[in-house]
Image (cartoon, rainbow, N blue to C red):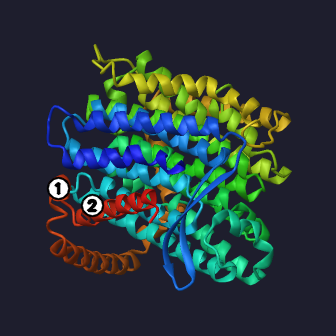
Amino acid sequence: MIYLILLPMLVSMILIAFIKDRLLKSHWIAVSMAFLSLVISSVFFYLYLSKNVVENFNWFNIGSYAFQISFIANNLHLLMAVVVSFISLLILIFSIFYMKKEKQERYYFEMSLFISAMLGLVISNSFILFYVFWELMSISSYLLISFWYERETASNAAKKALILTKIGDISLLAGIIILFANTGTLSISATISNLSTIPQGYLVAAAALFIIAALSKSAQFPFYVWLPDAMEAPTTVSALLHSATMVASGVFLLIIISPLIYASGTLIYILPISLITIFVSSLLALDSVDTKRILAYSTIDSLAFMFLAVATLNPNGALFYLIMHAVFKSLLFLLAGELLILFGTRNIFKLRGYGIKKPIFYVPAFIGLASLAGIPPFLGFFAHAALSYNFSASLEAIFVIATFLTSLFSFRLFFTVYHEDKTEKIREDKSAMIPIIILSVLSVIGGFSLFFFNSIIPINYSFGLFLVLDSIIALLGLFAAYYLYSNRDASYAKLDKKLKSIFGRLTYDGALSASGIAVTKFGGLVDKFEGLLGKAFDKISSLSFDLSYVSRELQSGDLSNYVVIFIVGVIIVIALMLAGV
């Protein structure tokens, strides 16, 4: 029965694809099915609270081995299903306003596919099913990032995301094969229970490959360069991608296979990568003038915090931060989308010129950015209390520096955009503000859930001297941003330009720019790969013309036929499962 969580969004895709009655709008189909998914997830969460139930279905046989589809219901997996459903519902509601002038059938079809992939991933208990949904997320993200495919920047961003995350996809598959060869099972829970039977060398190899997969999917160093470019997608896509789906899946992978990482000893490699990612992303955020790119770098920064928690034997602290981050990051992206619709620009200095010092905008913005910075009593403060529990003294010292940088770039955005008030009147869409208000309220009071989170997931936290210092440092970042950015003059402009130049040289992007020849060669390989990819999908298209008719109307890209065939296959498999075949 656990798989019923998936059905609403699968039904959403079918209805959007095949129903042509304009009275039944695609956005209402998607929103109603997302609401149903939330209801089902919540009911299952209540029914299976403190239980651990696994449901297995035979898929196919090879010789004497039966490959199974396996779903799991426990506190961890169902809590994630509730979070994914809830955030997705709010973003789809906001999409009614944000995407009203766009190709709605295609948009809601692809968003439903994206949400289905993440829901399937978080309730999977077999590596093969987990991998299918992992890949499906890559495909759906490609389609959504290239939604405005007529723009070259969007098309190129989608290609970059597909290729860089494909490194992680291949790594994940290789790790799964290693574990299967040594355990004879594809069950995630059974594999974790039998780690002692796997030779150490294979443990290390599998864990290293899983870490690469997580780094790639969660846009960590050195793979992070795809995520800022993915901001070419509609802002609602960015909100979902950054909060409850795509990039969250890498952290979720590390959490569920954390016993493997700890048994292999490979966690020592996560720590330095996380620290590098934190400082590089912070500098890049200070370097950017694009609201969405700043938020993208902040996501990379926050994900690195979660990786840091996993590296310090605190996966449940990472989980709590992941959930809190989903709330305030979706809030910030929806605000960015609102500003883009109203003013037509993402440049923070041009937005400053409009002057949007209005409570309906700057209060939610302050709440979201204060949560990001870790200022009490907002979400980030409680998240810091959970994720930093196992930090050593030296790591605490590094973390407060990271907190200062995070606070500085967060409130650079706030004081640049929201400081002046020159606009006579702003006509915001009242219905679009409903998700923003809900997320704002949760960002204020949601952190207190830490005190009873332990009844769901065992978690340690501390409100000791370190957290007091961390909060003071976050406030210092706020005051520094106010001093530097609230009154922009000629001297400030020179300082900002100089800092941008320095940061550009310090970052990985700067290094890439300096390596023009290498990038050009890589670009050539990308073009060749894309050409082969296009030819492959053209072949699929020619062999499946009838099945792909509806999909071609919804999606003009080369991958559309593949997506429809995949969905039909999923539905057939579920039907066979229900029939007991």
Looking at the picture, tell me which residue is in the foreground, 180 or 473: 180
Residue 429, by quadrant, is top left
Residue 541: % across, % down: 19, 71
How dense is the environment of label 1, judged by Cα within 10 Å: few (below 14), some, or many (20 and up)?
A: some
Q: Which residue is mark 2?
A: 564
Residue at (38% x, 75% y) in the render: 519
**In the image, what residue occupies the spot 35% across and 33% down?**
32
Residue 466 drawn at (x, y percent): 82, 38
- Quadrant location of residue 64? bottom right
In the rendered image, which quarter contains the C terminus?
A: bottom left
Q: Position of residue 133 (x, y in %)?
A: 46, 61
Q: Residue furthest front?
A: 580
Q: In screen coordinates, is 212 left or right of 312?
A: left
Decide which of 481, 301 is in the foreground and name it.
Answer: 301
Q: Look at label 1 and name its amino acid.
A: Val
The residue tagged with tag 1: helix, strand or loop? helix
Name the residue rendered at 65%, 47% in the picture.
76
User: Residue at 56% of width from left, 53% of height from top?
Assistant: 123
Q: Say whether residue 29 is left or right of residue 197.
A: left
Residue denoted by label 1 = 550
Q: Residue furthest bottom?
A: 63
Q: Amino acid at mark 2?
A: Val
